[in-house]
Amino acid sequence: MNKKAFQDSYPEELSHCYGCGKNNSDGHQLKSFWQHLDKQNLLASTTVAHHTPSDIYTAIPGFVYGGMIASLVDCHGTGSASAMAYLAQNRDMGSLPALRFVTGALNVSYLAPTPQGVELELIGRFSEIKERKIIVDITLSANDIICAKGQVIAVLMPDSMIR
Amino acid sequence: MNKKAFQDSYPEELSHCYGCGKNNSDGHQLKSFWQHLDKQNLLASTTVAHHTPSDIYTAIPGFVYGGMIASLVDCHGTGSASAMAYLAQNRDMGSLPALRFVTGALNVSYLAPTPQGVELELIGRFSEIKERKIIVDITLSANDIICAKGQVIAVLMPDSMIR
């Protein structure tokens, strides 16, 4: 299993995202990995990311703000979609041409307040895998309690966004 | 029409949100206002907010990252819900007991890349107004082009979140 984060395989010019770009020193630098990889049954594969938000990302004192949670779900979703696209094409992640995904739609349900100072775990599952569209369903947990569920409809990045 | 931002009427202890709290010096400090206020037909009222994201909130160079957009939609939604709750009860915003709303669910559709360096405009419309649940539909525009649409299902903050 590859221990390099999905986001660390993005092309340099596409690694500036505040949520997950390794070239954005101000941002969250989320790192996503395969949790379970099943090349025979792609839909059975799962992804994982861990992140402890900085205390500045407060909702009310003691709890993580919703925008941070949405951001983590978003970036774990697009990262998982990219990794899945490479897997589906049986290509090494990061090989050219790049398969980078952007978010078409993001849905997040906030089920419980998310505590601060705790490592959050995001698990990604796939409900649809097409060449240009991949749907990732994500849970976000703290202390093994699911605090949020999300869905990312990820679409292959249009050429117009790549300078 | 009251020129004080909704968020500036939140109680001090509920003003630490990274997205919109006046007491969070690191955050976005989003400010929302009434655009159109109709006490006879609450559903015809609309809200507005303007914000130019810092350049650190990059998706890829030149474009705002999705988590920022989700955050703005989220905070404009909960702020609008709070203001509407006071309006519906014919109470001054900020009067006690506080009517502060949290996000039950957040949906964002990304329709076009959102350019950086441009003032973004958020417009909120109401599709459901109940005592404990208010639904706000939001557009986010740059240069008069709608870049994202979102919906916030806002619920009255549970006592368990108020310390």
Image (tube, coloured by chain):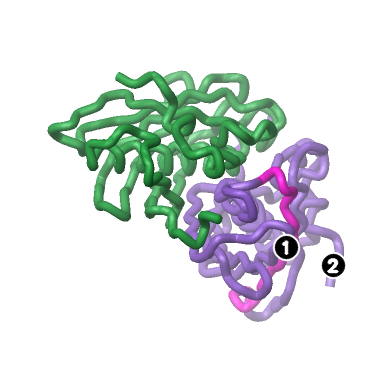
Chain colours: A purple, B green
| B69 relative to B129 in the view: left or right | right
Q: At x 32% / y 48%, what residue is drawn?
A: B135
Q: Earlier in the sequence, mark 1 or mark 2?
A: 2
- Nearer-the-camera pick, A133 or A106: A106
Identify the magenta region: A42-57
- Residue furthest to the right in view is A3
Q: Quadrant of residue B42?
A: top left
Considering every residue shown, the one lying at the far front of the view is B96
Q: Secondary structure at mark 1?
A: loop
Give the residue at x 55% y 61%: A113
Q: For the residues marked 1 and 2, what is the alpha-carbon distance in whole angstroms? A: 26 Å
Question: Which residue appears at 69% of the width and 34% of the height?
Answer: B26
Disc nearest the viewer among 1 and 2: 1
* Residue that badge 1 annotates: A118
State the residue position of label 2: A2
Judge whether residue B77 can be spotted in this image.
yes
